[in-house]
Image: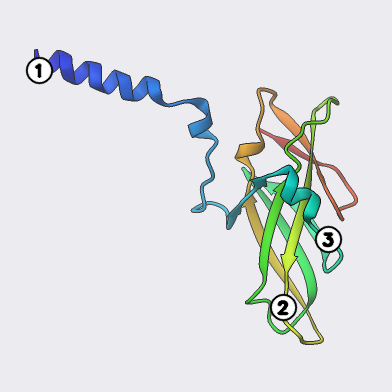
């Protein structure tokens, strides 16, 4: 009887896991997580930095970003998704980076940061990412 109860308990835990659980952000792999929010996306100003490079490595969007500052250690960098999918082939998502930079120095600083983008996945096997201030669409295949 105890064996049956244990098996039923184990199966209930297994079946309660959803595919969304598999898409949760893993900060042990990437530096930060994408934030899906139409409101935050629309409020984001992108005028205070340039993007030098943007590539996909596994499930991370790696971005090289430059701005004025002292050393960049106080920068707060976030990635926002519009929370909408553009119907194209492949489908497309819109992204913006927000840089909060209170450093008051004239040096030009470049930093690399990566964002876990698994949360952007859909049932398709690839998505085009339209990162504002980056001239090319980025293909994310999974």
Q: Secondary structure at mark 3?
A: loop
Q: Residue furthest bottom?
A: 105
Instruction: Please identify the quarter of the rendering in which residue 121 is found.
Output: top right
* Label 1 crowd (10 A; few <14 / some 14-19 / many >=20): few
Residue found at x 78% / y 54%: 43
Q: Earlier in the sequence, mark 2 or mark 1?
A: 1
Instruction: In the rendered view, tell whether residue 47 sits above or below residue 4.
Output: below
Residue 31 position, x and y percent, is 58, 58
Residue 129 position, x and y percent, is 78, 41
In the shown orientation, is residue 104 left or right of residue 5? right
Q: Which is closer to the viewer, label 2 or label 1?
A: 2
Q: Are marks 2 and 3 in contact (CB under 8 Å)?
A: no
Residue found at x 70% / y 23%: 124
Q: Secondary structure at mark 2?
A: loop
What quarter of the picture does the N terminus occupy?
Answer: top left
Give the CA distance from mark 2 to mark 3: 15 Å
Give the CA distance from mark 3 to mark 1: 60 Å
Label of residue 2 in the image:
1
Q: Are marks 2 and 1 in contact (CB under 8 Å)?
A: no
Residue named by callout 2: 102
Residue named by callout 3: 46
* Label 2 crowd (10 A; few <14 / some 14-19 / many >=20): few
Residue 76 position, x and y percent, is 65, 67
Instruction: In the rendered view, tell whether residue 104 sits above or below residue 86.
Output: below
Instruction: Please identify the quarter of the rendering in which residue 125 is found.
Output: top right
Instruction: In the rendered view, tell whether residue 86 sits above or below residue 45.
Output: above
Q: Residue furthest right?
A: 135
Q: Earlier in the sequence, mark 3 or mark 1?
A: 1
* Label 3 crowd (10 A; few <14 / some 14-19 / many >=20): few
Q: Earlier in the sequence, mark 2 or mark 3?
A: 3
């Amino acid at each position: 009887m105890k064996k049956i109860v244990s098996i039923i308990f184990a199966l209930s835990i297994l079946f309660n896991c959803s595919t969304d659980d598999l898409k949760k952000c893993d900060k042990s792999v990437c530096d930060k997580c994408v934030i899906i929010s139409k409101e935050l996306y629309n409020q984001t100003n992108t005028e205070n930095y340039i993007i030098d490079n943007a590539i996909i490595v596994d499930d991370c969007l790696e971005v090289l970003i430059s701005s004025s500052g002292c050393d960049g250690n106080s920068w707060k960098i976030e990635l926002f998704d519009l929370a909408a999918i553009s119907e194209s082939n492949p489908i497309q998502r819109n992204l913006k980076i927000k840089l909060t930079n209170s450093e008051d120095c004239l040096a030009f600083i470049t930093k690399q940061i990566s964002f876990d983008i698994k949360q952007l996945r859909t049932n398709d096997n690839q998505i085009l990412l339209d990162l504002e201030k980056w001239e090319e669409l980025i293909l994310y295949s999974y």
